[in-house]
């Protein structure tokens, strides 16, 4: 009975995906597609981790912090975008929802969001608006793992409802942003808490591509074996997430997707680019995401920064071989980038120009 239930849930996720008209799909190729070339050309961007964790000195939380404890003095989206632009970055990836499930927009599907908080500013809209004004591209981070809306991850019977919830939220996010700009990237995280077949990857990919075909879709720890979806009791096989262990032809764990993520790892040299799914070969660049200081979210004791020499070396390694670097800057509780972060990025740009 359990096997039949799991298989039914897997097939349901495919049905959700296939029900959407006008969908793009991944075409097998050992060369970058048009939109992959655009991503490679962007080369360098900013990660912005900001949310309820900002106000509790933690990196991860479980959804138990009251929404009203999120209370930034302001949301200085203009400064965030200007900082990225002045640093020579080409796009921003903004955390829309982290693992605790708190949403930086007013979502129809949960009360755990800015509308219930100490500052009701729709952060997604504010940043999208500024990106349009300042000519900056925008990407969004969204955690698949939601410790609030899907707290019992071991309960496979909850998958259908939660998977639908995610797809509806992705549509909400695109409803907000498409008034101002096209999303160039969706960065998904938290996939490790369930076997791959329990995530509606097909539905996620098609939901996005049917509206935003240029948007590149990536899932953290993309490369590695997956359990057989037709045998729910099969043990999870080994991950191949360490770049030095990846070889051309390795399987794509979460398919379809457009690029590799291995937070916070850097690509190997030489870096393989062609990976496989069901016997077909696909080109996938690597995007590195690294903290400028020590932590992803603002923390009152986070004062340990990478040196300029470290950052220059990191930039060179991460952006070589047609790959991409994203540096994380966490806004503080006043809703502003820290001056130390801003100054360090400007200094880094001077060195990058000399390369």
Image (tube, rainbow, N blue to C red):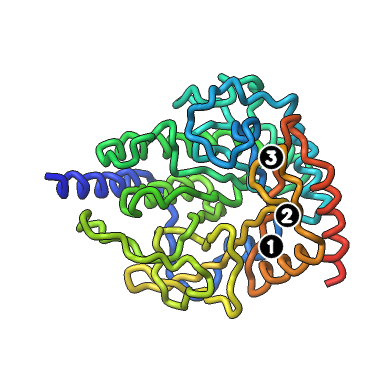
Closest to the observer, 333 or 93: 333
Closest to the observer, 209 or 130: 130
Assess whether mark 1 and mark 2 are in contact (beta carbons under 8 angstroms). Answer: yes
User: Residue under circle 1?
Assistant: 43
User: Residue under circle 3?
Assistant: 298
The answer, for residue 124, to whether it is visible in the render is: no
Q: Which mark is residue 90?
A: 2
Choose mark 1 or mark 3, whichever is in front: 3
The outermost residue toward the bottom is: 270
Residue at left 42%, top 58%?
Answer: 256
Q: Position of residue 230 (x, y in %)?
A: 21, 57
Q: Position of residue 84 (x, y in %)?
A: 77, 49
Q: Secondary structure at mark 3?
A: loop
Mark 1 to mark 3: distance in Å?
25 Å
Residue at left 48%, top 30%?
Answer: 63
Residue at left 74%, top 38%?
Answer: 130
Residue at left 66%, top 38%?
Answer: 180
Mark 2 to mark 3: distance in Å?
23 Å
In what quadrant of the picture does the C terminus appear?
Answer: bottom right
Mark 2 closeness class: few <14, some 14–19, many ≥20 residues within 10 Å: some
């Amino acid at each position: 009975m359990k096997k039949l239930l799991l298989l039914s849930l897997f097939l349901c996720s495919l049905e959700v995906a296939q029900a959407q008209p006008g969908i793009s799909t991944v075409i097998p190729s050992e060369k970058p597609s048009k939109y992959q070339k655009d991503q490679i050309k962007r080369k360098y961007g900013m990660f912005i981790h900001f949310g309820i964790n900002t106000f509790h000195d933690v990196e991860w939380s479980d959804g138990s912090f009251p929404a009203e404890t999120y209370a930034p003095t302001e949301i200085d989206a203009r400064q965030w975008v200007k900082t990225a632009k002045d640093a020579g970055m080409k796009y921003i990836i903004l955390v829309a929802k982290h693992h605790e499930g708190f949403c930086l927009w007013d979502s129809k599907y949960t009360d755990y969001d800015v509308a219930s908080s100490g500052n009701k500013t729709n952060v997604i809209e504010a940043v999208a608006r500024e990106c349009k004004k300042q000519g900056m591209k925008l990407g969004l981070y969204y955690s698949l793992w939601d410790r609030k809306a899907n707290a019992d991850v071991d309960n496979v019977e909850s998958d259908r409802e939660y998977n639908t919830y995610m797809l509806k939220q992705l549509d909400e996010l695109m409803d907000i942003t498409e008034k101002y700009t096209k999303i160039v990237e969706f960065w998904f995280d938290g996939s490790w808490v369930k076997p791959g077949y329990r995530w509606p990857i097909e539905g996620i990919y098609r939901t996005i591509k049917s509206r935003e075909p240029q948007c590149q879709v990536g899932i953290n720890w993309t490369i590695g074996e997956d359990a057989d979806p037709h045998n729910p009791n099969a043990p999870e096989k080994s991950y191949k997430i360490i770049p030095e262990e990846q070889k051309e032809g390795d399987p794509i764990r979460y398919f379809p997707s457009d690029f590799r993520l291995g937070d916070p790892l850097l690509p190997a040299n030489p870096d393989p680019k062609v990976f496989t799914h069901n016997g077909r070969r696909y080109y996938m660049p690597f995007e590195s995401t690294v903290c400028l200081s020590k932590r992803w979210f603002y923390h009152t004791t986070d004062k340990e920064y990478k040196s300029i020499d470290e950052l220059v070396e990191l930039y060179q390694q991460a952006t070589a071989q047609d790959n991409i670097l994203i540096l994380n800057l966490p806004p503080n509780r006043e809703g502003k980038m820290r001056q130390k972060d801003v100054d360090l990025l400007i200094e880094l740009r001077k060195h990058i120009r000399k390369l």
